[in-house]
Amino acid sequence: MLFRVLLIKSNFLFNINMRVKLSQHFLINKEIIKKIVSKSNLTKKDIVLEIGAGTGNLTQELLKTGAKIIAIEIDKRLVSKLKERFGNKKNIKIIQADILKYEIPQSITRIVSNLPYEISAPITEKLIKEWNGEYWCVLMYQQEFAEKMLAAPGVPWFSRISFLINTYTKCKELFLVGRENFHPIPKVDSMVVELHPLKNFDEKLIFFANCLFNHKNKTIKNSLISSRKKLNMEKKDISMKLEKVNKEISNKKVWQAELKEIKKVYNVFKKFLP
Ligand code: SAM
């Protein structure tokens, strides 16, 4: 008896942990679902990647547009439910996969998703990195994260993700979504954004930005010195290289620097980066 109680309790805790880890908060407000789909501007010619299809509420509305849907979901149990719900539809492919390990097909024209918030940053980086020159996205994020994405240099929450979005995309707010529109109700509100990746990704620039933004409240000079191990450079090398940059720039706090100022510093360091 005691063993059964313990087993039920541990299953219950496992399910709760899994739900939190996989950000399983399902959108239940039909009007909001319709608004996301309408903002995605889909036609029958589109091929849509839906990340984290969950119980299929957004998927169902996407299917009504006649577009071809590729629905990715990591959770086996949800994949079975999605197959039960949509198995008879011709314009859907349901794939059990971790989006971070999934190679985005070249044919995709849109990405539409109520994202798993726990992995918002790596997913966004992936979407920009693997961009095929065609697709654009309508994505729901945790509001606080989306505000960082939309931040311009000079606001204290300007961060690594703001730099990435400002450098490689056009991104705009579409609308806010309150937490009461989800089941189970999360602890945060959400924002839907439109994201257009724009150009080829430069891995070295992102590595350099990571080094800078790891210490974003320090000056550019001190931040690079703090990252010297990662940069594989001595303190004196960093100071010498910075002599080629206007002193005013190297003494600016990282979050206060303009994008073009960060790129100026990057251009000096670029060929020496590991
Ligand atoms: N699209 C559904 C909706 O709007 O109600 C569900 C959205 S829910 C916020 C996020 C979904 O992403 C969950 O179903 C979760 O299981 C799934 N998920 C979490 N991590 C994932 C990953 N690495 N790859 C694919 N799906 C993932």
Image (spheres, rainbow, N blue to C red):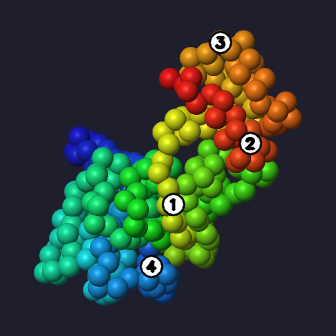
Residue identifier under label 1? 198
Question: Do the CB atoms of the residues marked 3 and 4 lie less than 8 Å apart?
Answer: no
Q: Earlier in the sequence, mark 3 or mark 2?
A: 3
Residue identifier under label 4? 40
Cα distance, mark 4 to mark 2?
35 Å
User: Quick one: which residue is furthest to the left in this view?
Assistant: 88
Residue identifier under label 2? 261
Q: Earlier in the sequence, mark 3 or mark 4?
A: 4
The amino acid at mark 4 is Ser
Q: How many marks?
A: 4
The amino acid at mark 2 is Glu
Q: Which mark is residue 234?
A: 3
Question: Do the CB atoms of the residues marked 4 and 2 lie less than 8 Å apart?
Answer: no
Q: Nearer the viewer, residue 122 or 198?
A: 198
Q: Estimate how packed mark 4 is, as few (under 14), some (14 to 19) or many (20 or more) residues with alpha carbons within 10 Å.
A: some
Left or right of 143? Residue 154 is right
The amino acid at mark 1 is Leu
Cα distance, mark 1 to mark 2?
20 Å
Q: Is residue 133 above or below residue 268?
A: below
